[in-house]
Every structure is written in structure tokens, then in C-alpha cells.
Amino acid sequence: MKGKDVLRDNVLLGLGLVLMIAALYLIFIYVPTEREMGVVQRIFYFHVPLAWVGMLAFVFVFIFSILYLWKRAMKWDILAHASAEVGVVFITLVLITGTVWARSIWGVWWTWDARLTATLVLWLTYLAYLLVRNYAAEQTQGARFAAVLGIVGFIDVPIVVLAVNLWRTQHPPALIFEGGITSSMLLTTLMCIAAFTVLYIIIVIQSASMKNLEAEVESLKDI
Amino acid sequence: MKGLFPKVFAIFRKDILLELRTKEVATSILVFALLVLVIFNFAFDPEASTISMVAPGILWVGFTFAGVLGLNRIFATEKENSCFGGLMLCPVDRVVIYWGKLASIFTFILIIEVIITPIFLILFNLPLFIPMLALIIVVATVGFAAVGTLFSALAMNTRARDILLPMVFLPVVVPVIIAGVKATALVLEGRPLGDMAIWFQIMIAFDIIYLVVSALVFEFVIEE
Amino acid sequence: MENMCFLFAAYTIIWAVVFGYVFYLYRKQRKLQQEINLLKEIMNKQK
């Protein structure tokens, strides 16, 4: 590995560790307990940043997909794939933590409220993105089809959010986040977003370099 | 631009003629859709009070399943007979193929819906002549067809096309399904057009966006 | 106190999933390394 890369990776890892510890401190010690929901509300501080960074991951999938279809360089496809994987993992966590949170507050595992539902549809869209690569006849076709899905799926996101939100306003809303956001809550949330963004970058770099290696090994096998 | 329409029409005509001759896809889809409607009746107790709430959903589930099945079958026969290869050899812009296929798929799904809807209305004891419902169905079908043409061309070249098509298609068309069900429910309640406007806006926006996007991206799906 | 359990469960799941994913990447990397070593051996033998 090149010296530059090792330095970059170590810096990122160190930064990530520091941010994550700071975030955990803020979540569990610094920020006061919320009045309405009590202690469980602290789930919010991972739940929301995971959603934000997950969406960020899909924004990058969109960008990388366009770049791949345009330039046809393998690296764009690999980056898109890695980003989508991390995105799906994060969104899966959003859904699971959302479920746990809902269960603790309202006693039900799932509500078809606007945000959870839209997140579920988003999750399904990018799950299909990952699966299409397996079903394709061969690698480059899989990359091409995935790129198409990365573009089409992303454009769908605002439409789905709009439609689901309208759909839910016809029924009594199940969730309202009472009370405003205090500055301490904001700080905690931002710190967590930063920590997860760095985590995202670390994993994408790691995953991408590994996929690169995989591709090299495959081509070596053919010799 | 001038020579565009005849080429699109040629592709469209070929598909329609083929289907008219064999009728194999249409009949199976129709029977399937009918079965879906009937089975849903067993799923929900047809009491008068609740049935009006579930009826729109049942109709659109029927449309969706029939649509997915139809898309699968259309492209499956294409693939089996290597028609697509022949189509690719033609010196036409890839987009032309998209528009041609879109036209025939749209017509196809629309015909199926036109036949299913009266049967649905009868089974659920609803008035038979509802022009607003027809409008909703047409607008929604444009969206279905725009996305469906793209994705079935995509799934056609993969190993497990029967599973893959619904998997990619359904999440993307969720807005159309939501809008279709909501608008249909409002129509059956007898609400004025103003209430439904927002759902029409969503469907039309979806249609326009996806007509453009799918046409642009189609060439990447069918390239060799 | 019961709510604490939910909080604990949520954070545990997050930790477990992220750790699981990283571990999955790590395992794939080890497998790749093994493959590379194998290929190197084969190529050496052919010399």
C-alpha cells in the first residue's frame, strides 16, 4: 500500500474514533433527558444521523452511477457499489432502531407513518440495486444495470416522500415530535452526523479497495 | 425528428399485430387478474360498510399484479424468439425502440385494465360509468408503462427475470399506486375534482419525469 | 427502567450490525488474501 494511503486511512480512523467517543459522551452524559419520552429518546441521536448519512450514501450512488455510465471506468462502479452497501446497512439500522423506538413509546412495532414508510420503500429500492448485480449475466452488465437503478431510484425518492406524506395526512398522524430542539440536542445530533459520516467514508474506502482487489484476482484467474 | 414517428409506429404495430394473432399473453393475464379480484373478495368480508374502503386497493393490486405479469410475459416471448436481437440490428436510435415498446406496452396494459374495471365495478356493485375513473387509470398507466418498459427490458437479460422485475419495479411505482388508490377512493365516494387534484398532480409529475428519464437511460439497458 | 432496556437494545443492535458488517468485510479480505497467495504459488510453480 502506498504511504499516502496508509496515512489517509490512519487519519480517518483516528478522527472517526475521536468523533465517535465524543458523540457517545454527548449522547449519554452531556445532553439532558428529554421531558416527553424519557431516556429512550436518546435513540434519536443515532437514528437520525444514520438516516442522514444513509441518504448521503445514496446521493453518492446517484453521482457515481452517472459517472460510471458516462466514463465507463470500473472505479466508479466499485465506488457506487460500496456506497450503496453502506447505505443499505445504515438504512436497515434506521428501520430497526425506528421500530425499537416506536415499540418503546407507542407499544407497537410498526406504524405506517410517513417517515417509516418512505424509508421502507427507499430501503427496498436500494436492496434491488444490490440484488440486480447478482442476477445479471456478467459483471459489466450488472454494473450497467445497477447504475441505471441508482439513477432511477434516486429520482424516485422525492416523489415517494411526497406521495407517502400526502397519503398519511389523510389519516390521523401517529407521530408528532413534541417540543422544540434545544441547542444541546442539536450539538449532539451534529456530532453524531459527523461521526457517522467519517465511518461511512472509512468503510467505503475499505470496501472499494477490496472490490478492486477482487476484480484483480478475478482477472488473474483468467490467465 | 421527422422520420421518428413512422419508426415508432412500426415497432408498435408489430407488437400489436403479434399479440392479436396469438392472444396468448392477454388471455392469461385477464384470467389471472380476475382471479386476483375474486380471491381478494374472500380475503375481505364483503360487508357493505367496509367494502368501499378496500375496493380501490383491491382494484389497484389487481392492476399491479396483472401489469407485472404482463410485462414479464411480453418480454419473455421477445427473448425466446430473439425478436429483440432483430430489433437491435435495425439502424434506429435506441430511444425509438423505447417509444415503440412503450406505446405497445401502454396499449396492452390499458386494454387489460379496460376489461378488468367493469368486472370489478360489477363485483363490487358500483356504478358502471365513471369517466373520472377512466382518466385516473389512463394517467397512472402512463407511469406504469414508462417505468415498466425500462425495467422489463432490464430484467429480460438477467437470470431470474421473474423475480427481478417486481423487485425493481414495485418500489419505484409506489407513488403511482398510492395516488391511484387514493384518487379512486375519492371518485367512488363522489368527491369533486378539486379534492383529487393533488393526486393527479403527483401522477402527472411522475409520468413526465419517468418518460424522460426512462427514455434517456433505456439505451444503457439494451446495449450489448 | 423498562425504557432503558429499549435504549440498550437499540444501541446494541446498531453496534452489532456495524460490527457484523465490518467483520464481513474483514472475512472477505482474508479470503482474498488466501486466493492471492494460492495464485502466487501456482505462478511460481509454473516458472
Image (cartoon, coloured by chain):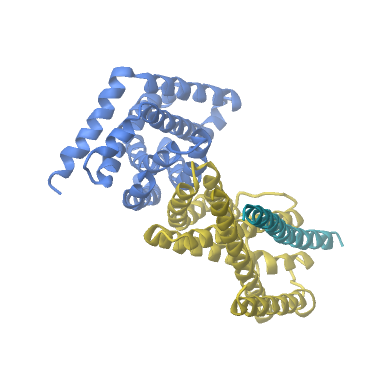
Count of labels in the image: 0
Q: Is residue A82 above or below residue A14?
A: above
Question: Can residue B3 be spotted in the picture?
Answer: yes
Q: Position of residue A223 (x, y in %)?
A: 54, 50
Write down which chain is painted yellow: A
Q: Is residue A13 above or below residue B141?
A: below
Q: Position of residue A211 (x, y in %)?
A: 58, 58
Residue depicted at 24% across the width and 34% down the height: B11
**Nearer to me, A74 or B178:** A74
Residue depicted at 54% across the width and 57% down the height: A81
Extreme front residue here? C47
Q: Which quadrant of the view contains residue C19?
A: bottom right
Q: Which quadrant of the view contains residue B193?
A: top left
Extreme right residue here? C1
Q: Position of residue B43 (x, y in %)?
A: 60, 26
Q: Is residue C36 left or right of residue A67?
A: right
Residue depicted at 36% across the width and 51% down the height: B217
The colour of chain B is blue
